[in-house]
Image: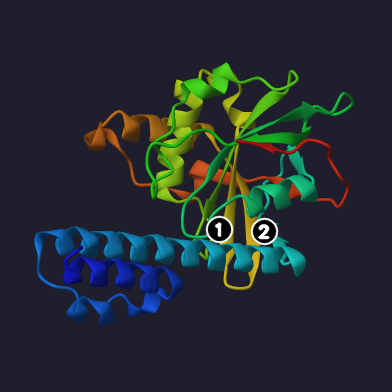
Amino acid sequence: MRPIYIFVNVLTLKLQESNPEVVELNDSLVSKDKGDTVSGARKRKRKRELERMRLWRKSTLEINELIQQQQIFIDSDNIANTDLKYILSKNILTKFILISEMQIDVTGHIYGISSSYDPGIKEICCIFIPNKWAIYQFNVYSFEQISQYQFKNYEFFGWIHTTASNDSSELSHNDRFFHTNFVHQSQQGQQQDQRVFVSCSFTPDSVSLSAFRLTSIGYEWGRIANAGKANKLKMYSPSHYEKVLLLVPDFQNNNVCYR
């Protein structure tokens, strides 16, 4: 026959699965035996798993609510006078938002095609989300993956990433460093003036998007900063980057995000 304390331990675990809020209350009913120490660890692990499930469910509901309300805003203030225009169809953007996390940065590589009659008009047809080595830092991706994946002869345009910051009107320090490395290490530097960075910010009631590109001065500043030559680094200037026009039309693009 089983000892009574083991029977109580099994009973509390079953109660915990049906009602996770009684985890701490059941600790006083379990004997302080070696076997009960293991069960306590299992209960704490179970509680953490349920907490992660609650956060994931809450984030999913919030994102779905933003999509249903069509609260998507494009930052079009102070657009640079260039011929570049990037077109991102709403269904691809919606797919990217739905598979993203509001608390974790998610980065994707942007691929598309240029217009035959106007090379400055670029349609984003695919967002590829590579593997990431960390959770809360987006600048830990493998740059070699860019050359490994080519989708239907699409051109590589740049990258997009989500952020929990409410301000997407300026390019952050981390984004500048990463974008410079992104262009140089991916062997895409021959067209660096056409490499775009799209910031997707989750604000309390909407999703805000801004598109940037680094100027030649900005690339040189980022190259020196990434090389660790701080003594030769000049003060950062807003002239190191400029905004480009990003359009989000309602037409449906048959391509989606790849993960």
Examine the image and state in which quarter residue 92 appears.
Answer: top right
In the displayed structure, 16 sits above or below 191; it is below
Please state which of residues 8 and 90 is positioned toward the viewer in this rendering: 8
Name the amino acid type tagged 1: Ser
To which residue does mark 2 refer?
75
Please state which of residues 223 and 37 is positioned toward the viewer in this rendering: 37
> Would you say residue 157 is visible in this rendering?
yes
Q: Earlier in the sequence, mark 1 or mark 2?
A: 2
Examine the image and state in which quarter residue 242 appears.
Answer: top right
Residue drawn at point x = 25 percent, y = 68 percent: 7
Examine the image and state in which quarter residue 6 appears.
Answer: bottom left
Residue at far front of view: 1
Please state which of residues 105 and 189 is positioned toward the viewer in this rendering: 105
Q: Quadrant of the N terminus?
A: bottom left
Image check: 194 left or right of 45?
right
- Looking at the rendered structure, which numbered label has been put on residue 168? 1
Q: Secondary structure at mark 1?
A: loop
Image coordinates for residue 156, horizontal then vertical, percent:
65, 26
Residue drawn at point x = 52 percent, y = 31 percent: 216
Whether tag 1 and tag 2 are in contact, CB under 8 A, the answer is yes
Residue drawn at point x = 73 percent, y = 23 percent: 154
Image coordinates for residue 169, horizontal then vertical, percent:
56, 58
In the displayed structure, 212 sits above or below 120; it is below
Image check: 220 left or right of 228?
right
Name the amino acid type tagged 2: Asp
Image coordinates for residue 77, horizontal then vertical, percent:
67, 59
Residue drawn at point x = 60 percent, y = 36 percent: 259
